[in-house]
Every structure is written in C-alpha cells, then in structure tokens.
Image (tube, rainbow, N blue to C red):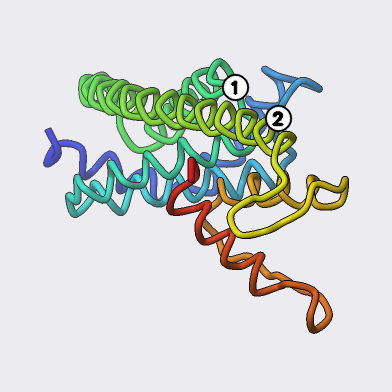
Amino acid sequence: ELERLRPVLQILERHRQMILQRWYELYVEHFGSLRSLQQSEFFELYEKDLVSLIENLVDPDMEGFEADMHAFACELLDKRITFTEVVASLHLLEESCAEAFQQEIAGNDLARVYLIFDKLSHCRMILLAGSYFSARTREHELHLHHLESTQDTLNRSTYHGLVGKSQPMLQLYESLAAAALGYGSILISGESGTGKELVARALHKLRHDPQG
C-alpha cells in the first residue's frame, strides 16, 4: 500500500500550495465566523501537517508518522480546536486533494487514487483520535490535580520548605502548584535576599514529588 501511495503523495507535494489555498477556502465556507483559526494560523498549522505527512510516507518512516500525528493532536488541543472541527477539516482536505488528483489522473486510475487516499485518511483519523483524546484526558487529570493541590495550600503554613500563611504566601503556593504542571523552563526573578533559591527548591520538589 505504501508503494502505491508514493505517486499520490508526490502529486500532493507538487500541488501543495493550491491544495492549502483551496482547503482554507472550503474551511471558511464550512465554518464561517465559527471557525477556530484565522488564515495565517490555518496555513501554519495545516501546512506543517501536510509536509510531515508527505515526508514520512514518501520514504516510509512509520515511527515518525505516528510521532508527528501525536504532536499534531496535542497542538490542535492546545489551540482548543474541537474534534468535531478537526474531523470536518480533514474531510475538506480530501475534497481539496481531489481537485489536484483530477488535474493529473483520469479514468480508472483516478478511482484507485481516491480509494488509496481514503484509506490513508481513515488511518490518520484513527491515530489522531487516539492521541487527541489521550492528551485531553491527561489535561483533565492535571487540572484536577491542580485543583486538589490548590485547595491543600489554603490549609498550610509550610509548603515544600517555604513558611508562611499570609495571603501573599498562599498566592505564591498556588502559583508554584500551577507552574509545576508544566515541563518548560521557569524564570524566577527578584531582588537579592527575597527567597528565589527557596522558591526554586520548592518548585523542584513539586515536580518530582507533588504529594510531598
């Protein structure tokens, strides 16, 4: 199947800009003012997806294909795009690609290309759904943990090495609990002697032992 898919993907690459433009036009027609993405956001998000699809499958890299689909699902979720919109958008991609196929293929060969691309679309949808809902479940779990941690800080006079129960300290504990949910670097700023090192240690403890 992958060997039969290669010429189809090469057509997508040759007509990529036309496909993206037509895809966006259909997206606007379908969703109107209810759409989640403006034109620049749409092109940035979906062109990256289309390029990775072509690159991963022209010279088959199934691990890369799955990894990119997972990253794509997480990005869709981060942008708060509903899965209903995702599904509809991917069907609009099929319609956009069909116009490109018609420019290069005719007769029975065109019907075979449609069938091959339809199978690919279904595989993508299955992978995307699994990653999207897995990420959303994880997001909900983190949010619940954050709510529980926040409630716990309201009853504390000490918190991972920090001491105090004043309103500013409780707000600091809550901010630390929220920051600990992320994975990126965090800049802790302040004048000398204000406890930056203590805050850094508390954050480190939270990330490694959030229940401690």
SS of the residue under disc 1:
loop
Q: Which residue is mark 2?
A: 36
User: Residues under labels 1 and 2: Cα distance?
Assistant: 9 Å
Task: Residue 136: give x, y in percent of width and height.
Answer: 50, 27
Q: Nearer the viewer, residue 124 or 177?
A: 177
Task: Residue 63: give x, y in percent of width and height.
Answer: 21, 48
Check disc 1 and give the amino acid type: Thr
92 horizontally vs 109: left or right: right
Q: Residue at x 40, y 27 (%)?
A: 134
**In this view, the mark in front (1 or 2):** 1
Task: Residue 160: give x, y in percent of width and height.
Answer: 58, 54
Q: Nearer the viewer, residue 123 or 105?
A: 123
Q: Which residue is mark 1?
A: 82
- Farthest residue toward the bottom? 192
Instruction: Name the image quarter holding residue 161.
Output: bottom right
Number of numbered markers: 2
Task: Residue 96: give x, y in percent of width and height.
Answer: 50, 29
130 horizontally vs 1: left or right: right
SS of the residue under disc 2:
loop
Q: Dot 2: few (<14), some (14–19), or many (≥20) neighbours within 10 Å?
A: some
Check disc 2 and give the amino acid type: Ser
Marks 1 and 2: CB-CB under 8 Å? Answer: yes
Residue 143 against residue 2 in the figure, above or below: above
Q: Earlier in the sequence, mark 1 or mark 2?
A: 2
76 horizontally vs 12: left or right: right
Residue 161 against residue 57 in the figure, above or below: below
Q: Residue at x 67, y 58 (%)?
A: 162
Q: Dot 1: few (<14), some (14–19), or many (≥20) neighbours within 10 Å?
A: few
